[in-house]
Image (spheres, grey):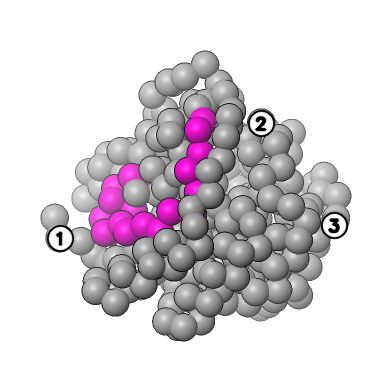
């Protein structure tokens, strides 16, 4: 099968393979595109939590991005873990310099176990520098609360917060509703012109490690393949849902997804 497009992933690595760069590469590849990376940090972690984070030098991050773009080219970009202001400024500089398109930002701020991954100043720079350059930002509810200062406890709060993120500078927001304690999950796509709600039944499982990374990479891949934003979100949400349903159940904590499920999706839709 020939690669449909080229996707640059700017994010941190996950030694357990369930999230971060590793999940991103699996997702982009499984959905038919070519994955390239600029690693921002190396984490030591597993399904039970993060033990340490080692930063990659800014010069190295910049060179990774330049080498990829100057030689191979980029059709879409997924941005994940940017853990300090220097990294955020570097990524902003590269996005502006190369006028990159189809950018999806997963604002990784809080680990699955609840640990805060970036400081207040970094949040300010993400809002100021990155939101206006991205086609889509994909916060979960705790991340949306950090971005807006709002408390979110229902679907109406989600829409209010998503509109606030639009007002801050984002073009489109897909606010993920998995943290609410309901039988149904409502993922809500908000732009300046419309609101689209994607409902689904919540799956009772602990195998949710890397869902945010996987979803944002899937959407970036679909956008890079010239699908519109509504279609990209629908395909990607279905992909993540089935990847959770067929998860391999590895580890003693929050287990990884089954990124290979896309091959079954292709057979089903053939």
Pointer 3 with pointer 1, Cβ within 8 A = no
Q: Residue furthest top?
A: 252
Residue 149 - label:
3
Within the magenta stretch, is there residue 57? Answer: no
Q: For this rendering, which residue is in front, 5 or 69?
A: 69
**Secondary structure found at label 3:** loop
Residue 29 in the magenta stretch? The answer is: yes
Relative depth, front residue between 231 and 76: 76
Q: Are marks 1 and 2 in contact (CB under 8 Å)?
A: no
Q: Position of residue 66 (x, y in %)?
A: 36, 72
Q: Residue at x 42, y 61 (%)?
A: 60
Residue 32 in the figure: left or right of residue 189: left
How many other residues sit within 10 Å of disc 2, few (<14), some (14-19) or many (≥20)? few
How far is mark 3 from mark 1, CA to CA?
45 Å
Residue 33 at x, y = what percent?
27, 59
Q: Position of residue 94 (x, y in %)?
A: 47, 75
Q: Residue at 38%, 24% (x, y): give it.
A: 248
- Quadrant occupied by the N terminus: bottom left
Q: In the displayed structure, does residue 97 sit left or right of residue 8?
A: right
CA–CA distance in space, label 1 to label 2: 39 Å
Classified by dominant secondary structure, the portion drawn in magenta counts as strand
Disc 1 target residue: 2
Q: Which residue is mark 2?
A: 113
Residue stretch in magenta:
26-45
Q: Residues within 10 Å of mark 3 (few under 14, many from 20)?
A: few
Task: Calculate the distance from the C-alpha at mark 3 to the C-alpha at mark 2.
Answer: 21 Å
**Residue 114 image label:** none
Q: Position of residue 157 (x, y in %)?
A: 81, 54
At horizontal 39% and vertical 29% (from top left) the residue drawn is: 246
Specify few, some or many for label 1: CA neighbours under 10 Å numbering under 14, 14-19, or 20 or more. few
């Amino acid at each position: 099968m020939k690669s449909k497009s080229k996707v640059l992933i700017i994010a941190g690595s996950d030694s357990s393979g369930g999230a971060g760069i590793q999940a991103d590469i699996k997702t982009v590849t499984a959905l038919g595109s070519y994955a390239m990376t600029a690693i921002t940090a190396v984490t030591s972690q597993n399904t039970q939590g993060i033990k340490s984070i080692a930063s990659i030098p800014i010069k190295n991050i910049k060179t990774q991005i330049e080498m990829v773009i100057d030689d191979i080219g980029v059709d879409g970009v997924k941005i994940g873990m940017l853990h300090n202001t220097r990294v955020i400024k570097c990524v902003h500089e590269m996005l502006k310099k190369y006028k990159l398109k189809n950018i999806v930002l997963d604002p990784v701020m809080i680990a699955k176990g609840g640990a805060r991954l970036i400081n207040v100043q970094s949040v300010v720079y993400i809002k100021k520098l990155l939101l206006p350059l991205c086609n889509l930002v994909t916060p979960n509810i705790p991340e949306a609360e950090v971005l807006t200062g709002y408390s979110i406890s229902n679907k109406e709060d989600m829409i209010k917060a998503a509109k606030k993120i639009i007002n801050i500078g984002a073009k489109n927001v897909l606010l993920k509703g998995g943290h609410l304690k309901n039988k149904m999950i409502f993922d809500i796509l908000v732009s300046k012109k419309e609101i689209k709600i994607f409902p689904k039944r919540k799956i009772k499982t602990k195998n949710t490690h890397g869902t945010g990374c996987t979803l944002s990479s899937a959407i970036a891949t679909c956008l890079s393949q010239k699908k519109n934003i509504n279609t990209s979100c629908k395909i990607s949400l279905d992909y993540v849902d089935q990847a959770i349903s067929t998860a391999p159940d590895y580890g003693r904590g929050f287990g990884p997804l089954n990124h290979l499920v896309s091959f079954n999706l292709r057979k089903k839709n053939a």
